[in-house]
Image (spheres, rainbow, N blue to C red):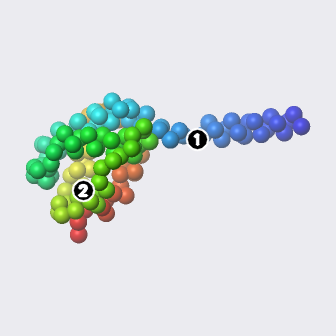
Amino acid sequence: MTKTILLITALLATGCASQRPADDLYRDLGGDEGVTRIVDAFLVHLAEDELVVDTFADTDIAEFRRLMIEQLCDLSGGPCTYGGRTMAESHAGMGVTPAMFNALVADFIDAMDDAGVPQGAQNRLLGRLAPMYGDIVEG
């Protein structure tokens, strides 16, 4: 009986130790400060990217920044709830091409590098963003 209890306890402890908390990615990104650093660096890269900068000419950058911070916080398991439009609604009629999308992803990766985000966390975040491709790119 004692061996059975010890075995069950060991199995439960091993199982719990291998489970990642829901906000693990959020913490790996640096929490609120880290997410904000990523978005701020991303905005700098967008402003310098001739392929995509005109796409944001009529964008309320302060609102874009706020919503992007909120979305990344939510998507990474942080304490936020994204309250903006869907990606399909936000990008409808913008004419985002695959080349533009790839440029945005490169800008985002550069921003994560600038913000000091570890490679593993970058890959996990990109994996959560990747399904949005079809809602962003037209054609």
Q: Is residue 65 left or right of residue 55?
A: right
Q: Which mark is residue 54?
A: none
Real-space Cα distance between discs 2 and 1? Answer: 35 Å
In this orientation, which residue lies closer to the viewer: 106 or 76? 76
Q: Is residue 97 left or right of residue 7?
A: left
What residue is drawn where x is 42% and y is 38%? 78
Q: Earlier in the sequence, mark 2 or mark 1?
A: 1
Task: Kindly tell me whether residue 112 is visible in this rendering.
Answer: no
Indicate the amino acid at tag 1: Gln
Q: Quadrant of residue 116?
A: top left
Indicate the amino acid at tag 2: Ser
| Residue that badge 1 annotates | 19
Q: Quadrant of residue 133?
A: bottom left
| Residue that badge 2 annotates | 90
Q: Are marks 2 and 1 in contact (CB under 8 Å)?
A: no
Could you say where residue 16 lies in the image, as x and y percent from the top left? 64, 38
In this orientation, which residue lies closer to the viewer: 74 or 34? 74
Image quarter where the C terminus lies is: bottom left
Could you say where residue 37 lies in the image, as x and y percent from the top left? 28, 33
Could you say where residue 82 lies in the image, as x and y percent from the top left? 35, 46
For mark 2, give the secondary structure. Answer: helix
In this orientation, which residue lies closer to the viewer: 42 or 87? 87
Q: Nearer the viewer, mark 2 or mark 1?
A: 2
Could you say where residue 56 lies in the image, as x and y percent from the top left? 14, 50
Determine the residue located farthest toward the bottom in the rendered image: 139
Image quarter where the N terminus lies is: top right
Label 1: few (<14), some (14–19) or many (≥20) C-alpha neighbours in 10 Å: few
Task: Kindly tell me whether residue 38 is visible in this rendering.
Answer: yes
Residue 52 against residue 41 in the figure, above or below: below
What residue is drawn where x is 58% and y is 41%? 19
